[in-house]
Image: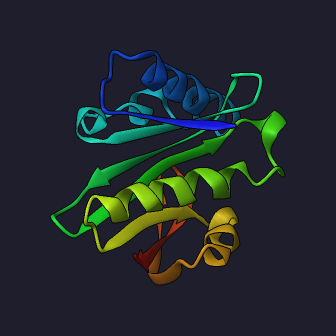
Amino acid sequence: MKILITKDTMSDIYLDAVRIRQKVFVQEQGVPAKLEIDEKEAYSVHFVLYTDEKKPAATVRLLPLDEQTLKLQRMAVLKEYRGNKLGAEIIKEAEAFASQQGFKAIELGAQLSSEKFYQKLGYTAYGEVFQDAGIDHVHMKKGL
């Protein structure tokens, strides 16, 4: 397993991230494609986890909100790799990167179905349930 990081939206790593997100969010969950890719892509740091067979399996992006806080977004694991703790691995890598860069906290909007997953990783829910792309979410945060 290897996790690669890029800010280059023309790189193969970024394109692998987009392919994973298309399969998970657009094809599986029915999120409109026009909502999946947004104007924040170029401002984000993109992570892709590759299997030992060099196949892209999971992705996440970090978007700086201010000098202390990042927003974790677009976390996705391809269906055939779920249940192998790859989501936790890529998030731990993103958290380590954020900490090394001097950030103090990570926020995210978790789909309600994923709330327990994030709680196990130390995230705390707050605020009201909200809709994003027609899916119920909850705000969560974690100090680094």
Quadrant occupied by the N terminus: top right
- Left/right placement of residue 121 relative to residue 103 reads right
Tell me which residue sits at (51%, 29%) in the image.
Answer: 17
> Dividing the picture into quarters, in which one does residue 49 lie?
top right
Question: Which residue is drawn at the image coordinates 43% and 76% (left, top)?
Answer: 141
Residue at x-position 30% and y-position 74%: 104
User: Residue 84: x, y in percent?
Assistant: 82, 50
Lateral position of residue 25 relative to residue 9, left or right: right
Name the foreground residue: 125 vs 132.
125
Between 14 and 51, the one lying in front of the other is 51
Q: Position of residue 107 (x, y in %)?
A: 39, 68
Q: Quadrant of residue 45?
A: top left
Drawn side of residue 71 relative to residue 27, left or right: left
| 101 relative to 46 in the view: left or right | left
Work out whether residue 135 can be spotted: no
In the orientation shown, which residue stands out farthest toward the left?
A: 67
Which image quarter: residue 71? bottom left
